[in-house]
Image: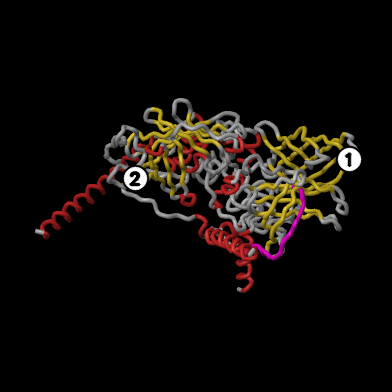
Amino acid sequence: MRTGFLRAVSLALMLSLPAAAGAQFGHPMKGQWSGEWGSKSNPSRLLLDLDWDGKDISGVINPGPTAATVKSVAFDYTNPSAWGVKIQAEGKDASGKPVAISIDGKLENIGAYTKLFHGTWTQGGRKGDFTVTRN
Amino acid sequence: MEKSLRTALLGATAVAVFSSSVWVLGAQQGAAQEGAAPGAGQGQGRGRGRGAAPSLPTPRLPDGTVNLGRVPGEKGVWGVPYITNMAMQVIGPDGQPVPEIVKLRQDQAAARAGGAGARGGGGGGRGRGGSKSEPWMPWMPWSAAVYDYHSLNESKYDPEGYCLPPGGPRMMATPYQAEILQQPEHKRVIMIFEGATHIWREIYMDGRKFPEGDQLNPTYLGYSVGRWEGDTLVVENKGFNENSWLDYFGHPHTDKMHVTERWTRPNKQTLHYEATVNDPGAYTKPFTMAWDIPWREGAELPEYICQENNRYLNRLEDDLGQPIFGPRPQPGVKPASGTR
Amino acid sequence: MRTKFAVVIAGVVLLMGARTIVAHHSFSAEFDASKTFKYTGAVTKVEWMNPHTFFYIDVVDEKTKKVTNWAMEMGSPNGLMRNGWTRNTMKIGHMVIVEGSMAKGGSPTGNARSVVLASTGQRLFAGSSQGNTQ
């Protein structure tokens, strides 16, 4: 009884600070995605800023001095609830050398605001797991 | 002297009530007879039987413009029907349902007559066939995949279920009544709706240009500019946000959507609604949908506040078992499923 | 004299705030005006929505290097637009310096009173939802 009341109260408070109530039901890849890739002990922070123009997904990975530009995105819609997504991007490392980024992941939780995109991240010879959620 | 006046008034009132109720019956049956038009089969007029009421002429304002609302001295509202799947309302250039829809409806009727329940095909109710069952829709691969996703989970994530307003034509497909208020002296048409939380639309009739770029703030109902072409109210709508679905079945749209509406009132009892959706972000070609909306003589709009007690929000979990409306998680954390 | 003037101004500001509170949901139910913060971080999202616009920044703890994403609340889009701001005023990835009051309860949420673009020092979205007339 009491837990139910507490739960209701905390739910009411939570509803006043909702989880990313920014609804978005256009193209599911469009928007900002935050997360990490690499080893658990020393992960690299990720911020993807993606857009959809009616033909292609375009955008930037980690806007700023080491930004990478999205070059191509391919989708596999065989499973409507978990899309296959492959992204190729090109950036520069800290010394200015060109770096190729290859992302192979799954797009899930498509109906929710905090969609999930996770899989394998390959960058400059290093490979690791990545997880980003829609901001 | 007073007594006879009172009796006379009572008598006059009785006659007025009697005749207006006759009008009401006549109007409803008239609407049922109008049912040949696309969409009327999906909600209104079913089972009302054949009435003999004649269709009444289109009412007009003093300056001759079509009156899309009440006639002075009378009450009434538009009985917006429930159109769950707008793909079934698509019409061709001749204004008639496209041949695939006609065939689908015939197949469904035959199946029903044969004893089987209404099946698949993307019609109203259960048994959604997804994008493949609607080959006439100009799908892009991603919009078909999203539609299939919504078909699989039966519109679980419909934002109208969150008491959010619809975008585009869905305001005329959500089954709550509406009124149209023409204000030619202010060069605008206002539409007020019982549904989607006491919402209204303002259609500018002053010939203005659309705001551009950052000035066009994307909204749920879009920015609307209208004009009369003869007896047709043509409204252009742009500047939709991406927080809504096109319909209950989950046809998606993007913020690039441009909707052209054509409103006519062929007779007093009928509002004929046509909408051309041109969304180069989600569909490869424009498509046009149409349905009829019956007049409800004598009715008034009640209050409806959707978000008053929407318990659905408290229960709703996403595909990963997390509450949709809950504390904001830190980004990038993949939750373990079912931890609730 | 100056103190008296300041008190009068503070009173006016509080009254303005009170009007907002009556018209909208309560500031003090969500935020603690006595717990202030000043954070610098990269913008990860802008929610140009009602009843309050939110933007989000990644705040890096200098010692632990841990990144926490903070939600910053501002006024409604209509109010901000009347002051000349748009949904594209703030760009993803830009560094901003945010000052404001923390949310009660410890979640990484703040009510933003001042937002300054780190690269130019330009003050964005002048006027916060605290004490702002809607």
Could you say whether the residue bearing mark 2 is in a helix, strand or loop? loop
Name the residue nearer the viewer: B290 or C20.
Answer: C20
Residue B265 vs C114, above or below: the answer is above
Q: Which residues are magenta?
A: C28-42
Q: Nearer the viewer, mark 2 or mark 1?
A: 1
The three-letter code of the residue at mark 2 reads Arg
Q: Which mark is on residue B86?
A: none
The three-letter code of the residue at mark 1 reads Ala
Is residue C35 a member of the stretch shown in magenta? Answer: yes
Q: Main secondary structure of the magenta part?
A: strand
Instruction: Count residues near mark 2 (Cα–Cα under 10 Å), then give few for <14, some for 14-19, many for 20+.
Output: few
Percent from the top left, x then y, of residue B128? Answer: 56, 42
Percent from the top left, x then y, of residue B227? Answer: 43, 31
Residue B52 vs C26, above or below: the answer is above
Percent from the top left, x then y, of residue A15? Answer: 61, 59
Determine which residue is flagged by label 1.
A94
Answer with the quarter of the image where residue A79 lies.
top right
- Subunit under mark 2: B
Determine which residue is flagged by label 2.
B48
Measure how far apart labels 2 and 1 are at the Cα level: 75 Å
Answer with the quarter of the image where residue C104 lies.
bottom right
